[in-house]
Amino acid sequence: MSAIIPCLRYRDAAAAIDWLCEVFGFERQAVHPNADGTIAHAQLVHGKGMVMLGSVAGDTAWGRLIRQPDEVGGAETQSAYVAVADADAVYARAKAAGAEIVIDIRDEDYGGRGFSCRDLEGHLWSVGSYDPW
């Protein structure tokens, strides 16, 4: 088996998990909290896809390589695409949940309909009905 799984960090990972599940339709597969309430590791699934995430931690080897979007002027070098059946419904939930819409919903030339937004901590997500499979 082979898979590519995006990994993200959040200052408030518990709130991010709730937001991602409510807005994009992820489901909790595994959530491992630390004693202090932060999240050591979480796995959220969406259909056949998954993201892993955790709380911004102290001085770790991996943590020294990663910055939060607000630490680099909101820039991203990558983003996740969430394939959904109804992009308009997810768009409405994202707006209602306070997502910053950075590319408004539209029909794409290559098929599908989608939009891009920033989540509650500024991570960039693209959501659409385009199915590359």
Image (spheres, rainbow, N blue to C red):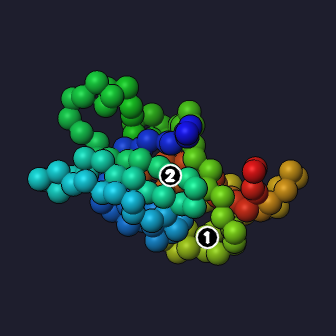
Q: Is residue 114 left or right of residue 76?
A: right
Amino acid found under the numbered disc labelled 1 = Val
Q: Is residue 127 left or right of residue 63?
A: right
From the viewer's perspective, is residue 77 above or below residue 90? above
From the viewer's perspective, is residue 107 above or below residue 109? below
Residue furthest left in the image: 35
Residue in view at x 49 percent, y 64 percent: 26
Q: Is residue 95 visible?
A: no
Amino acid found under the numbered disc labelled 2 = Met
Residue in view at x 34 percent, y 57 percent: 30
Q: Secondary structure at mark 1?
A: helix
Residue marked by disc 2? 50
Q: Earlier in the sequence, mark 2 or mark 1?
A: 2
Residue in view at x 50 percent, y 42 percent: 6
Q: Is residue 119 left or right of residue 103?
A: left
Res 92 quadrant in image: bottom right
Rate crowding at label 1 as few (under 14), some (14 to 19) or many (20 or more) other CA atoms within 10 Å.
many
Q: Picture coordinates of residue 79 (x, y %)?
A: 57, 43
